[in-house]
Amino acid sequence: MDNFRFVYKDENNDCVGEIKNSRLILYQDLKNQIEGNIYRVRVDSYINSMDAYILNIGEFKNAILRRRNIVSDFKVGEDIIVEVLFVPNDDKLIEVTQYISISDGYIVLLPFVKSNSPKIKNDLTISYTLRTKAKDLPKEEILFRYNNLLNDFSHLQKEINKLPTPKLLRKGKFLTNFCLDYDGEIISNYKLKFASIIDAKFNPKYDREISTSIAKIDDRKIEIDKTSIYIDQLEALTVVDVNSGSKFMDRSKEDMSLSTNLSVIEEIVIQISLRNIKKMVLIDFIRVNNRNKAKIIDKLKQKFEEYNIKAKILGFSRLELLEIIIF
């Protein structure tokens, strides 16, 4: 199969991934998967320079709550309820928010969101959105699930002044969402209700593409034919440097530069997806004229859409670096 998702579990491993166009584009170790988890936490301290609070959530490292993710005022030492947004692979703190969401895999309740977005529905008491598989549900079932989530939210609100703190209040629905948001084949080595193929012999480490990609997931240098890219994940941003090779030496300098740049775009997008790169990305493409810069941006937009990456392309800076924000 060229396109599928997989779920694998044994005594030592618990992971999921996605193959697209015969390439591994997503891999997640579920052992430390806490995104979407909701916790009661204590506010440990405030960092003035970052305008952010440090929280002890009871996990393998502390969390950071930034001003933009705060719903209501509180003081250091108080208990609050937060949801995990993102867990960096490096030493950075876990990103959390007070804008919690509650999901059953089909409906996502958004208690603190007010929006005119067509994706967010406001026809009931609290805003909500429907996940992909919920579009065909009858209205009665949607209302039933919605009311169940309302009850869950009510119970969460009552947890604020209880003990102990920190405490995990609700597990995220990562695996459920991972499966329900996908329309293709899902293969699992154990009985999983979302899987379309159950194969007890399936093991990602025995698949050449999967095992090779996982082994290289932290490599700085990526070879693409006779060209290469270098990926440096820094504290606040990620820098991608495109190095020219001899693949297009029979063309003019401008054509060669454009062809080289276009030839590495899909690999750059795959690496952004596979490495779960977020926030600011700077790409140092080989220099081309303004008309060809537009072609580079057009192909990037196309590939971001193809690989379901939410991104905002800011354009080329004065230093000729393409600036992108990945959400």
Image: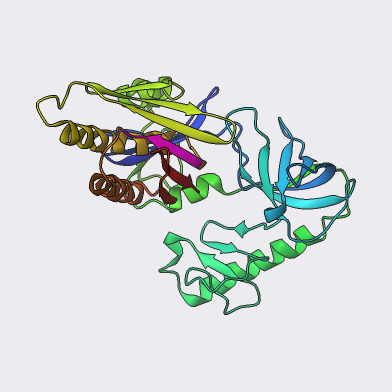
Front one among 256 and 148: 256
Q: Residue at x 45, y 69 (%)?
A: 137
Left or right: 186, with 67 as reference point:
left
> Please, is residue 70 above or below residue 318 in the view?
below
Kindly report the secondary structure that dominates the magenta region of the rendered protein: strand
Q: Residue at x 42, y 42 (%)?
A: 318
Left or right: 191, with 229 as reference point:
right
Left or right: 80, with 219 as reference point:
right
* Magenta stretch encompasses residue 233: no
Front one among 229 and 93: 229
Instruction: Look at the image and tell me whether residue 172 can be seen.
Output: yes
Q: Kindly indicate the quadrant of the structure image that contains residue 155.
A: bottom right
Instruction: Look at the image and tell me whether residue 193 can be seen.
Output: no
Front one among 219 and 258: 258
Q: Residue at x 64, y 64 (%)?
A: 149
> Please, is residue 123 above or below residue 319 in the view?
below
Where does the N terminus fall, quadrant-wise?
top left
In x, y percent, where is residue 43? 83, 45
Q: Kindly indicate the quadrant of the structure image that contains residue 200.
A: top left
In x, y percent, where is residue 94? 67, 38
Residue farthest along the left direction in this orientation: 250
The residue range painted magenta reads: 280-285
Q: Residue at x 90, y 46 (%)?
A: 77
